[in-house]
Amino acid sequence: MNDRIRFEVETTIPTVHGSLRFRAYTDLVTGDLHLAIISGKPADGTLVRVHSECLTGETFGSLKCECGPQLDAALDTIVRENGIVLYLRGHEGRGIGLLNKLRAYALQEEGLDTVDANTALGLPADARDYTAAAAMLDELGVHSVRLLTNNPAKQQALIAHGIDVTERVPLEVGRTAENAAYLDTKAARMGHLLHVPSPRADDAGDRAPSSD
Ligand SMILES: Nc1nc2c(ncn2[C@@H]2O[C@H](COP(=O)(O)OP(=O)(O)OP(=O)(O)O)[C@@H](O)[C@H]2O)c(=O)[nH]1
Ligand SMILES: [Zn+2]
């Protein structure tokens, strides 16, 4: 499997979440540099988050999606419980890239939802490939995982690449008035398992309610 990725370097970085080990891998097919962010010793059964890059959500605090809070929560969780966050470059915009994601956002301003905006651009609703993620887990000696995700398709994709997903662990954070319709569309049209209710109108701008 590891004709797909090449390990480059490992270094430890102190972060607001705690001390984390960063292992960098070159994707030999796409040229992207992916990261495995690790707390504790990788082992079968470990907690894993396979996270798709989202510049707008993670760097600029976009409230259109929940990627930023999900990444923060995943890093906090692996520091607490040990585990791995695979940070996948080239997955931006569900695999259509930053420029096309911004084009899709422009169409969403005209009323299209997140699925139809991709389709209107002649692009798949989800173009992500998980081969590199599975190869990184293989390189780390991890073949069974508890997966932090709300997306059963991501679970199935990893299974199809030979990773035994023993449990799906929900990661429902970051719901706001701004992204409630987007999250509801992901649940209705993309099969995401989302149960946290939308914030009330008078909560607009607040961060996600704790849970149900
Ligand atoms: N094309 C497109 N991509 C988006 C949009 N909103 C967020 N994204 C991208 O979607 C990716 C994250 O995928 P999501 O569908 O939010 O969630 P997921 O990774 O499938 O599922 P979880 O594991 O539950 O987070 C990131 O790369 C974001 O950049 C959008 O409206 N259009
Ligand atoms: Zn995002």
Image (tube, rainbow, N blue to C red):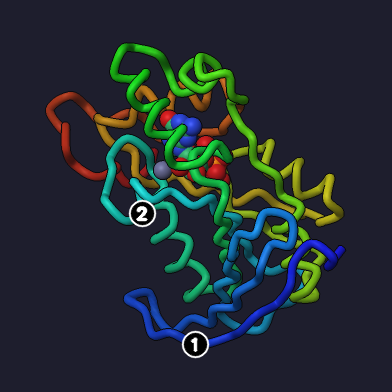
* Secondary structure found at label 2: helix
Residue type pointed to by label 2: Glu
Classify mark 2 as within 8 Å of ligand 2 or not, answering yes or no.
yes
Residue at 12% across, 28% down: 202
Looking at the image, which is closer to me, 112 or 14?
112
The image shows residue 124 at horizontal and vertical percentages of: 62, 25
Q: Is residue 4 visible?
A: yes
Q: Quadrant of residue 73?
A: bottom left
Residue type pointed to by label 1 = Thr
Q: Is residue 53 above or below residue 75?
A: above
Image position of 105 with respect to 109: above or below:
below
Q: Quadrant of residue 85?
A: bottom right
Task: Give residue 45's position: percent from left, percent from top.
Answer: 74, 67
Answer few, some or many: residues within 10 Å of disc 2's Cα (few below 14, many 20 plus, some between 14 and 19). Answer: some
Left or right of 109: which side holds 53? right
- Which residue is labeled 1 in the image? 12
Q: Position of residue 150 (x, y in %)?
A: 56, 41
Q: Residue at x 57, y 32 (%)?
A: 192
Look at mark 2 in the image and give the residue it sits on: 58
Q: Residues within 10 Å of mark 1 (few under 14, many from 20)?
A: few
Label 1 lies in ligand 1 vicinity (Cβ under 8 Å):
no
Does residue 116 sit above or below 93 in this rendering? above
Question: Which residue is pictured at 30% across the width and 13% down the height?
Answer: 110
Ligand 2 found in image quarter? top left
Task: Tell me the SS state at disc 1.
Answer: strand
Residue at left 68%, top 58%? 146
